[in-house]
Image (cartoon, rainbow, N blue to C red):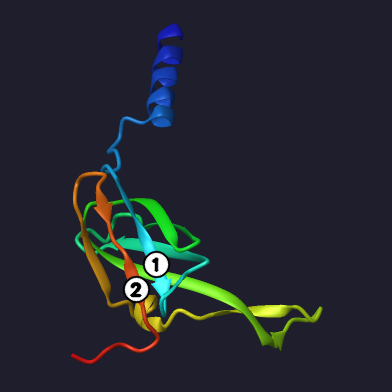
Amino acid sequence: MNKLFWLIAFAAAMTLFGCGPSRPPTYTVSGTVTFEGTPVADGDILFESEENPALRAEGGKITAGKYSVKVNPGKNKISIRASKPNPDKKGMMGEPIPEDYIPEHYNNASILHETIAPNNENRFDFALKEKLEKK
């Protein structure tokens, strides 16, 4: 009985504290985000691995045009979102309803891709525009 107790306790400890596969390391990525030349005051940035879709997407906040997040290494697709109150749209209490202002080509259909190096010196600045320039 005593051996069974310790065997169960050991198995529970391994489950709780993990002895399974660990997540790959993440690395710091930082930079700035502007839209039409103005820093994005408040938004979100998301990095999704293009090399390993099984990896969890990593993201964080954009505040006063700056961000810093821990990201999976390798090629990543980046999505950027931000909203601001639209004075023309009102909620039930008369408050302005927030509206996304970053174009779809930077989020749902993002054209942004970067390769994250396995170090903490990754810096990417994004100067977003309403309309894409034709090449």
For label 2, the SS is strand
Q: Determine the residue positioned at 43% across, 59% down.
A: 66
Callout 2: 10 Å neighbours few (<14), some, many (20+)? some
Looking at the picture, how far across and down is residue 123, in whole percent?
Answer: 28, 56
Q: Determine the residue positioned at 39% across, 67% down.
A: 33
Q: Which mark is residue 127?
A: 2
In the figure, 6 relative to 96: above or below?
Answer: above
Q: Say whether residue 38 is left or right of residue 26.
A: right
Residue 53 versus residue 35: which sits nearer the camera? 35
Q: Residue 90 is drawn in which quadrant?
A: bottom right
Marks 1 and 2, how far apart at CA: 6 Å
Q: Say whether residue 44 is left or right of residue 112.
A: right
Looking at the picture, how far across and down is residue 4, in whole percent?
Answer: 42, 14
Q: Label 1 amino acid? A: Val
Q: Residue 52 is drawn in which quadrant?
A: bottom left
Q: Residue furthest top?
A: 2
Q: Determine the residue positioned at 50% across, 61% down.
A: 64
Q: Residue furthest bottom?
A: 134
Residue 67 versus residue 51: which sits nearer the camera? 67
In the figure, 59 relative to 14: above or below?
Answer: below
In the figure, 45 relative to 28: above or below?
Answer: below
Q: Earlier in the sequence, mark 1 or mark 2?
A: 1
Q: Residue furthest right?
A: 93
How many numbered circles are shown?
2
Q: Determine the residue positioned at 45% across, 7% down.
A: 2
Quarter occupied by the C terminus? bottom left
Residue tagged by mark 1?
33
Callout 1: 10 Å neighbours few (<14), some, many (20+)? many
